[in-house]
Image (cartoon, grey):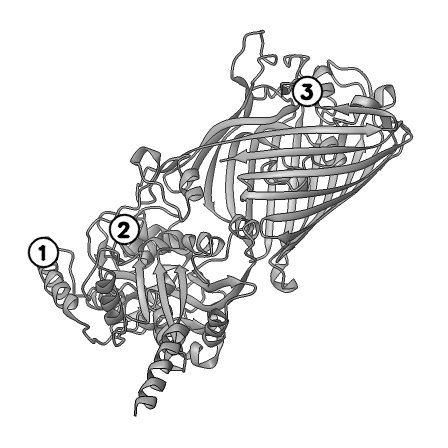
Amino acid sequence: MKAISTLIATAALVSVAGAQTLSLKGSDTLGAKLVPQLAEAFKAAGNKGVKFEIAAEGSTTAFPALANNTAQIGMSSRKVKDEERTFCRTKGVYIKEHPICHDMLCVIVNKNSPLAGLTKAQVSKIFTGQIKDWSEIGGAPGKISIYTRNTSSGTYKDWQKLAMGGRDYPSSSLKMAGNEQIAQEVAKNKNGIGYVGLAYSKTPGTKALTIDGVQPVAANAKKYAYARLCYLYAPDKPTAEAAAFLDFVKSSSGQAIVEKVGFIPN
Amino acid sequence: MNAAKTSLSNRMNGLKCDKSVTQIISNHRNRTMQVPPVPHAHPTKRTMQSMKSIQRALLATSLLGCISAQAGEEPMTDAVATDAPVSNASGLLLGKFPGETAWDRAWSGFTLYKNDDNQILQEFSLQGRLQVQTIYGEDGGDSFNTSDYKDAGNDETVWGNDFESRRARFGFKSKWFQNWKFEGQIDVDTDGRDGLSDDHTLYKNIYDLYITYAQSDALNISAGKTKVKFSREQEISSKEILTIERSLLSNTLFPGELTGVWVNGKGISEHWLYELGIYGSDRQREFSTFNQGVIVLGKIGYDYSTQAGLDSAVAAFHYMHNSEPGYKSPKVESNYSFGTSPAFTDSIALTNDITHGRFGLTTELLYGFGFTGTPEDAKAIDQSNVFGLTIIPSYFIADGLQLVGRLQLATCSDPDDLRVPRYERLVAGDDESGNTYSSAYVGLNYYLYGHKLKLMNGIEYSKMGGGDYDGYTLMSALRFSF
C-alpha cells in the first residue's frame, strides 16, 4: 500500500513538474473568445499538462512580446509590419506566420428595407453621419438609426478603421453591448443599420447587405470588403507545446472550433 | 483580480472554470467589465445604472466561485459592455511609459503623448538620430583616417580627431484627426560652420517637414519637404541601412531633400504598391523656390512574398526624371555639400528585396542617363551614362549579430565620369575619377535595441578602374535613433 502511495505521489510530482505554460499575447479579436476555446479543446484533446496564459490587449502587443520572449505565440488580426518583423529579427526571433481564420463583419438592416446592397463609400458616409436619411441612397424616407458596438469594444475601433477611414461615429449613434443586441435592435427598427459578425447576419427580422456587390458569406471571405485574415505568429523553432497547439488550431478539430465561434475557417 | 478575470472570462466563453490551466491575464476589450451582456440594452442612463448594479452583484458572485454559463457565439466579440471610460493614453507628459522591457520603456519616453481615443490629437512624439563613426583606410602606401577627413574641410562635425558626427537630426512627428500626420526634422549643426554666419547655432537646415493625409494603406497624400527616395538603398532610412555607407551609384543618382507633393500606397489588389511625386529640383536649406526645374519620381512594385513563401519579398521599378540636371541654387552657400542636382536627365532602378528568417538579400540594378550642357548659374556638364549593380546579402549568425556583405559594380561610358566615395577621395587626389568601380564590403552589425541602438563594423575593398584608387577602408559606427 505504501509503495502504491509513493508511486502515485511520484507520478503526481512528475506531472506537476512536467506542466508547461503556453503564453499567447496580442489581438483581442482572437484572444477574447476564439483562442481560449481552442486552448480548452487542446487540453481536452490530451494536453492537460499545458497551462495557458492569454493576454489579449491588441495585435500591436504581439510582436514585442515575441521579440522579448514573453510570449511563445502572438495573436494578430493583421499581418505583421516590416518594422515589427525586423525588430524580432534583431532580437534573434525569426517569426513564422500561421493564418488561422477569416473574420467578417456584415452590414445589416431591417428586413423591410428595400435596399439590397451598399457601396463602401455609402457605408462610410452612413456610419460617419454624412448620409442621414435613407432617401439619400434610394431607400424609403426615414432618419437612419445607427447601431454600433460599445466604445470599449475592440470591434468599435476595428469598424472605424475598416469602414470609416478612421473617422468618428456621429454622436447620435446608439452603442450596444454586443452583436446580438445590435441585431435585435435593427430587427425592431425599420430605419436601423448596424454591423455584426457573420454568425449574426441571419438574425430574424434583419437582412445582410451586399457591399460593392459582394455577398457577406463565408465563400466570399477573400473579396468581401469587411473581412480580414487573422494570424498566429510563432518563432521558426517554437517550443513543443506551441508547435502542438499550432498544429491543433490548423487541424480539422481546431478549424471546427473556429467555425463554431463564428469565424471563417482558413 | 486575475482569478476573477479568469472565472469571468471562462464564464463568458461558456467554459467550465479551470483557472489552473487557462488564465486570461488581460483583455483589452473587457478590461473594466465584469458581467455578462444584458439583453436589449438601450444606452439610457437609468439602464446603465441598473446594469452597473447587476454588474456589481455578479462580480461579487463570481469572486466566490465559478459560474457556468452558456456563451453566445459572437465573433469579434466582447461578451460584456459598459460605457466606463478606458484610457489607453500614455507618454512622457502623462508619466506613462508602456513597454515590456526597460529598453521599451526608456524609448517610450520620446513619445510625449499618445491616445488613440483622442479625436483631435492621437500622438505627438520626438524623433531624431545621432550617428557617429570613425574610419581608417589605405590605398597602396597612403593611409587616411577621420582626422584627414576633418582636415579636408568637410562640413560634418568631427569630434576631436577620430569621431565624425555623420548625421545628427532632431524633430517631431504627430498624428491628428485619425488620418493626418505632420512631421519634420532639422539637421543639427554641431560645429556652427554651416550657417549663414560663423555663429554657432544648432540649426543647420530643414531635413524634412511635411503633412500627410493617410486615407488608407492604399492612399497617402503628402506635401512638403522630404527626402526623394530613388533606389532601394535610399528608401531605407540611414537608421536602418545594413552597411555603414550606401553604395556609390545610389548616392550619385540621389536628388536630395526636395519640396513637392507625392502620393503613395500599398496593398492594392493585395500585392501592388506605388509612388508618384513631383518636386522642385532646387536643393535649399529650407524650401524650394519653385522657379527652376522639376524632378518627377514614379515607382511601381509587387509584393510576391505569399507566392514565394518568403517572409517579405518585393520587386520594384523606379523611374526619375530631372528637368534641370546639375542645377545648384545660388542661394545655397558654397560650403554646403548637398546643393547640386544630379547630372542625369533620367534614372531607372530595378530592385528586389527579400527577407526570410535569418537571411536577407537586396539587389539593385541602376541606370542613369547622363546630361551634357550648361545648367543655369553653373559650369558646363558632360556626364555620360552610368550603370551599376549592387548586391547586399545579410545573415544573422547569432542573436542580434548580423553578418552583412555587399558587392558593387559600376561603370560609365566616358573615362572619368565616376567618382570614388567620400572617404576614398582623401587619398585619390586629382585622380579620384574613373570609369569602372568595383567594391566588396563585409560587416558585422550588433543590435543592442533593434535599429534604434546598434554598433556597426565593416571593411570595404574598392577599386576605381581608369582612376587611381585601389585600397580598403575600415569603418566603425554607433547608431542611435528614436
Does residue B356 appear to the left or right of A244 in the view shown?
A: right
Q: What element carries label 2?
A: loop
Q: Residues within 10 Å of mark 3 (few under 14, many from 20)?
A: few
Q: Name the residue under label 3.
A: B337
Q: Distance between the residues labelled 2 and 1?
A: 30 Å
Q: Do the residues labelled 2 and 3 touch (CB within 8 Å)?
A: no
On the image, the x and y values in percent for residue B372 come to 83, 25
Q: Give amino acid for label 1.
A: Gln
Disc tally is 3
On the image, the x and y values in percent for residue A195 come to 32, 62
Q: Residues within 10 Å of mark 1 (few under 14, many from 20)?
A: few
Query: Between tags 1 and 3, which lies in front?
Result: 3
- The numbered mark 1 sits on a residue in which chain? B
Task: Tell me which label, 1 or 3, sits earlier in the chain.
Answer: 1
Residue at (52%, 35%) from the top-left corner? B481
**Residue placed most toward the observer, B138 or B192:** B138
Does residue B334 appear to the left or right of A208 in the view shown?
A: right
- Residue A88 is marked as none
Which quadrant would the N terminus of chain B be assigned to in this image?
Answer: bottom left
Residue at (31%, 64%) from the top-left corner? B24
Q: What element carries label 1?
A: helix
Q: Name the residue under label 1.
A: B49
Residue under disc 2 on the same chain as residue under disc 3: no
Using the image, determine if residue B352 lies above or below residue A260. above
Which of the 4 image quadrants contains residue B57? Answer: bottom left
Using the image, determine if residue B49 lies above or below residue B58. above
- The numbered mark 2 sits on a residue in which chain? A
Q: Hey, which residue is sitting farthest bottom in the picture? A: A1
On the image, the x and y values in percent for residue A201 come to 33, 71
Q: Name the residue under label 2.
A: A132
Q: Give amino acid for label 3.
A: Ser
Residue at (77%, 32%) from the top-left corner? B473
